[in-house]
Amino acid sequence: MEHHAPPLPDDIIVQVSAAAVAAVDDRSSTSQIEEVDGGDDDDVKAIVGAGGLTHRTFSESYRMRHRNPLEFTPWQVALLAYQSLGVVYGDIGTSPLYTFSSFTLPDPDQDDLLGILSLILWTLTLVSLVKYVFIVLHADDHGEGGTFALYSLLRQHVNITGKTMPVPVTRLASDANLKFHSKKSSLQPRMLKFLEGSVIAQAVITYLVLIGTCMVMGDGALTPSISVLSAVQGIQSRSSRITQGHVVLLCVIILVFLFLYQRYGTSKVSFSFSPIMLVWFVLIASIGLYNIIKYYPPVLKAISPHYIYIFFAKNKRAGWEQLGTVVLCITGAEAMFADLGHFNKKSIQMAYSCLVYPSLILAYAGQAAFLIKNPSKLSTTFYSSIPEPLFWPMFIVATSSAVVASQALISASFSIIRQSIALGCFPRVTMNHTSKKYEGQVYSPEINYFLMIACILITVGFKGGPEIGQAYGVAVIWVMLITTHLITVVMVIIWKINIALAGSFYAAYTVLEGLFTISLLYKIAQGGWVPFAITAFFLIITLSWTYGRSKKNEYETNNLMDSQEFIKTVAMSNRVPGICIFCTDLMKGIPPIVRHYVQHMGCLRELMVFVTVRYLPVTSVLPEERFLFDRLEPFGVYRCIVQYGYMDNQNMEDDEYVVSIIASLKEIAQNADEVAMMDSALANGSTFIFGRVILKMSDNHNCFKRFIINNLYRFLQKNFRSNLSSLKIAPSKTLQIGIQYEI
């Protein structure tokens, strides 16, 4: 049970708040007082550090993102739409490279090709245009998109208990007062009541998010392979001496250079992305229009869905087996939502509706028109349909565009791992910020080289065959199916759309994407197992890590020092000058590491602060909302909660960290003696205490749980970075205390 000092009298709170206002009047900031939920204990008063002070000490490490909806002129929206071409549309834009050639019909005729084109046109329209551009893009978390943004949005509106959740969940009453935390409505839909009352439903949503994000990692490993292979493969048509082995070797060389270049950051490459993609879309649209006119002008009659019926009626089982291949035309649709934070809804909608979508329609229609007259060229559709004078220009542009498509997914993988670490569901890896201007541009060498090895193995293993297309389609459709489930919950709970309308959306897209999914299941043995293997790899890491952390937190919660023991321990210890900062995951109670520390050190500093870094399910936390403080007993002991959003950059120097804490602690000081004690402690230096905990599960548990804790979790602890590595604290100011928890 955590011990709290008696609440500050109201008059003192007013005096402190007024003093804080006076102290930072020049910065137009005020202190804020919030009620913090103390769990089983009575609510306690916590004072957030003054906005001016936090702004002064966090000005470099905390940069304001898109805080309020920005108004853009039509010209600015058009400029953003142009810039989005190089970041958002590389994947879906290069899908004409491999979609038609991934079909394996033995002797396709005109009806077959019109049926395939009709499937492609309707899939592009219903999934990428209607679902993503006009519906999913609106489910942003204050401008941020992606699977984590959907989950963040739901966690802000649904009171998730967290007792059996794989992702750590903590909730304070002050969370609802955060400026960029979505507000609940007084009208609560039945689904909201159901979710808040069902731990199983909450767990299902969380696991869906984790699986979806791990699937995106599989997508990130497959995209560079299939994109670069499809672009390079056309070189075989130039000479009979160029074999498939040469193509694979060239592809591997390009991939190695692509991944080695990641260390310099996306900004070094991205300046050329948009012009490349603009040229790409203009060329594929022009060539498509040329092929339509030259080979089969009525090809766009495939817009009639009755050609789909004719296709399946004629091909039956063979047609059904080809259905999953259609998914390749919408690869990268998820990127429009995931990259929303870099642009805005209008710019993405404009770019896709006015340029990308029409270009893709013309490209696919042109390829179908060419194939109607040249059905034997199905396996080499893209390059075979290009007019001879344009081959080498298209080869260069296609290869460059494939690199753009690869870059987008690689960068997205870095961001996903970063967000996973912030939510506590993935062990820490190195995260280097490659841009001082754009906070979201990060690079992780561990993840980069894992993806590089995976891409090379996939490229060499599949040898550029059609199996790589089967694997890619499986990864894409599962992520989309998960998004459909999550967006439906958002519709009902947050948007409060009529249940019948939301149910119609859910039924339509679940059936559509479900059919694609079922069609792809038979391809698991033909290469579709690859994304599942990559997903399983990351899911094992995620679940092992979160399970180990939950058992560690459970042990510490059950073995807290009670208030009387802590007061007695402090009273019997020598108090030496200086500041001791205990870093802990617990937001209430005195962690058992303190007991272990005192037993070996025999003394305590005159000022002790228990610091917990807390990540909230919001994109960013404002500087004035960064700190929460509470005074504990005995004298000189405090608790500090440092709050971050999942897109915030935790970037503080040790001295800045300590000065910020002391400056904010002075606001809750009750008298001049307490302020003098704080100044004296600051002058005598500070020490950061970290616990190096080793978990050992006893034989009372089953062998599976023991294997997870004693082997997997311990392996992750040893081989991934510690919490200490993410803080910029000088080694001379840190002290790690080793302790083993028998659970």
Image (cartoon, rainbow, N blue to C red):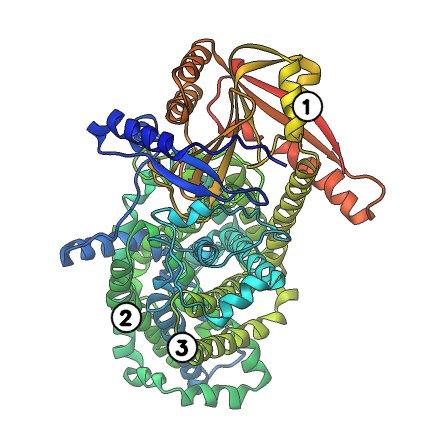
The residue identified by callout 2 is 358
Asked if residue 307 shows in the view, the reply is yes
Residue situated in front as seen by the camera: 584 or 235? 584
Secondary structure at numbered mark 3: loop
Query: Dot 3: within a 10 Å radius of its alpha carbon, few (fewer than 14), some, or many (20 or more) residues?
Result: few
Query: Which comes sooner in the sequence, label 2 or label 3?
Result: 2
Query: Dot 2: within a 10 Å radius of its alpha carbon, few (fewer than 14), some, or many (20 or more) residues?
Result: few
Residue positioned 24% across, 27% down in the render: 22
Left/right of residue 738 with respect to residue 408 in the rendered view:
right
Residue situated in front as seen by the camera: 181 or 110? 181
Residue 267 at x, y percent in the picture: 32, 39
Secondary structure at numbered mark 1: helix
Task: Work out how far the residue at label 2 is from the one at label 3, CA to CA, in angstroms.
Answer: 32 Å
Q: Nearer the viewer, mark 3 or mark 1?
A: 1
The residue identified by callout 3 is 498
Query: Which comes sooner in the sequence, label 3 or label 1?
Result: 3
Question: At label 3, which amino acid type do we have?
Answer: Asn
The residue identified by callout 1 is 595
Left/right of residue 238 with respect to residue 528 in the rendered view:
left
